[in-house]
Amino acid sequence: MSYSRQSLMCRCYGAMKKCFVFTSPFLLLIAGADKDGNLIQQKLHSICCMVGEGCKYLYDVISDTFSWGIQHVQDTGIFDCNGNLELRVIIASVVLGAYSLLLFSYVWKSRNIRARIRLKQDSCRASINDLKKNIIQVPSKRVEEILSCNFQELRRRLKKGEVTATEALAAFQQKALTENDRLNFLVEPVKEAEDLAKDCDQKTNRDRPLNGIPVSIKENYFMEGYHSTGGMSTLLKYGTVKEDGVLVKVLKHLGAVPFVRTNIPQLMMTFECSNPIYGCTVNPYNLKRGPGGSSGGEGAILGAEASILGWGSDIGGSLRIPSHFCGVYCLKPTAGRLGSKSNEELDEGLVQSLINPTPGPMARDVDTLVEAMKAVLCPFMFELDPEIPPIPFNTEVYESKKKLRIGYYYSDGYVTCIPGVKRGLDEALEGLKNRKHELVEFVVPDVRAMFSELFCKACFGDGSEHVMNMFNDDMVDPTITLIVLMHQFPKFIQKYLSYISTWVTNDRVTGEQMRAMLGVGSVTDWWELTGKVIEFRKSFLQKWKDLELDAVVCPTFPYVAPPTGAVKYLIGGVTYTTLYNVLNFPAGCVPVTKVTAVDQIAMQDYPSNMAVEKFIKKYFSADTGGLPVTVQCVGLPYQEEMVLRVMKEVELGVADLKQS
Ligand SMILES: CCCCCCCC/C=C\CCCCCCCC(=O)NCC(=O)O
């Protein structure tokens, strides 16, 4: 069945269900009264007896509710109950029958969904067990030797034939399987990895830029023969992908060996890495905490040093948040620089063109990111996707020794950063100063309005309708139940709830976000929104130009890895990352420090005015020792090389500080 027919059916079913659920209590009230205002108890009773004893309880509840309802109607005198008794019996039976049908269809559907999920889980488990049984045997000393190499060293050894691609693959497979038992970052291994590695071992292939390098790939990347679901089991129905996406094709062409597919949050629009198909991934530094998302599986596998180069994606922070929580490096390029044909359009209809997602690399040092970008920005990719601007990596910008003028800020004006994050930025700035760069304070514009009025409105412009239709045929992960449940209510109730939530949380952003997720009303509204985004970009750019900045360095996120299950209370933090998606500026993360006991004690002075701050105080005052902190380096659109240069400067600056 086509996507659009499927989507139309879901929409109809959803609308009917909503309509029915909200009107039927009134129909039942009308149907339940006879001319004296008494309930048609006997008749209902006999119907219920026919269905069996089990319904008796239901009948009692309904009957009591009717009695109360009718009494209430009579007391208020607004309904004179002179209708036709038989008609009411029919209405009552129809309503009850329809409820039973709905219940039955719900149970049936849930059964099918569970079966679909179980099937996929079984096949993933079998794949993992298969690899465990058949993994190429490499002596453990050799494995350790390979795993201890950085990217440059591993590439050099592979090129010289000192390490074979097959050995490198086996070493990372072994490490990934071991770490996965602890962290659950694996969706499934890539079955053809061994064949790809064997091919890399041919002498004629050794000069390829990524020859023999094992790479991990986020689940939403298209790979022939694999499902790409974004954690939505409903998308399993469309089967496995028929063709590799652009980046996978490019990586294979360059000699890389994709060896595992990694986990994501359900729908990929939050940063709690959990979904009903593949379960919950945890943080390599603290198993009670999350790795972030949506590229959370990538964060965890790289943080656990079970991969050397990974590929994720980002529309609101999905590369940067897991990098920050797991202490790894990443580059979120300008949306467009690596195209959009690698991992998007999981489902037609989920595409909007105002704020675009982008694929990007994740790694364990800046050099790997640089080499990855140099490699993929190649004629082969420009030919495959002519929409990608054919701009190769600008080595001159990256290697320039020119002193830079760098803007910085400690707060974006909304959620205050915890002490460990502030200290991380202190260290990065000190390192940059020591390397003779000029630092300039930078004040960012209103991020609250940016997040709700621009980011949420753009990403959920259809009032989250398309997404909600997908949930009609899926289980909802507990990490997003609340927000999905809220969308079941009619819009006017959601609006009402949004005002209550502003009042309860003492935070206007929560309510504004809820209203923004109700979408825009018309094409005119969408154009207006587009105008606002353009205006926001223009005025930000002007500020940047006025200060003559080369780059900006700032916190990646206001807090470190949160306990699993806590993200729903901490969403406000995303203003730090979403800002650079709305602007479409490239940004990367560099790990700079880890939370200390002193940082934890300093949490006593953390504000607790808004609910989000209270939750931050609750979750980050203890048990955060040793959790990584990164800083975010930002550049102007299409200046990925400048971002990488600043990242390198931060990396070197912080390393110097630690040595001195
Ligand atoms: C209607 C149900 C939607 C449930 C999703 C929760 C929504 C929370 C609202 C806004 C928060 C935005 C957080 C963004 C996190 C980063 C996501 C991201 O970059 N995804 C893109 C990708 O993975 O490619």
Image (tube, rainbow, N blue to C red):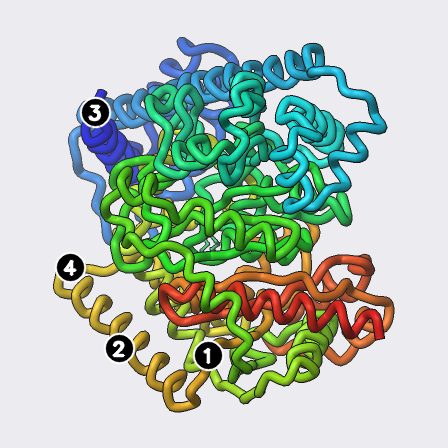
N-terminal of the two: label 2 or label 3?
3
Q: Could you say where residue 106 lies in the image, as x and y percent from the top left?
A: 40, 24
User: Which residue is label 3 attached to?
Assistant: 2
Element at label 3? loop
Q: Is residue 134 above or below residue 610?
A: above
Q: Could you say where residue 592 lies in the image, as x and y percent from the top left?
A: 70, 66
Alpha carbon of mark 3 to alpha carbon of mark 4: how far?
26 Å
User: Which residue is label 1 attached to?
Assistant: 550
User: Which residue is label 2 attached to?
Assistant: 535
Cβ atoms under marks 3 and 4 closer than 8 Å: no
Alpha carbon of mark 4 to alpha carbon of mark 1: how far?
39 Å
User: Which residue is label 4 attached to?
Assistant: 522
N-terminal of the two: label 4 or label 1?
4
Alpha carbon of mark 2 to alpha carbon of mark 3: how far?
38 Å
N-terminal of the two: label 1 or label 2?
2
Element at label 4? loop
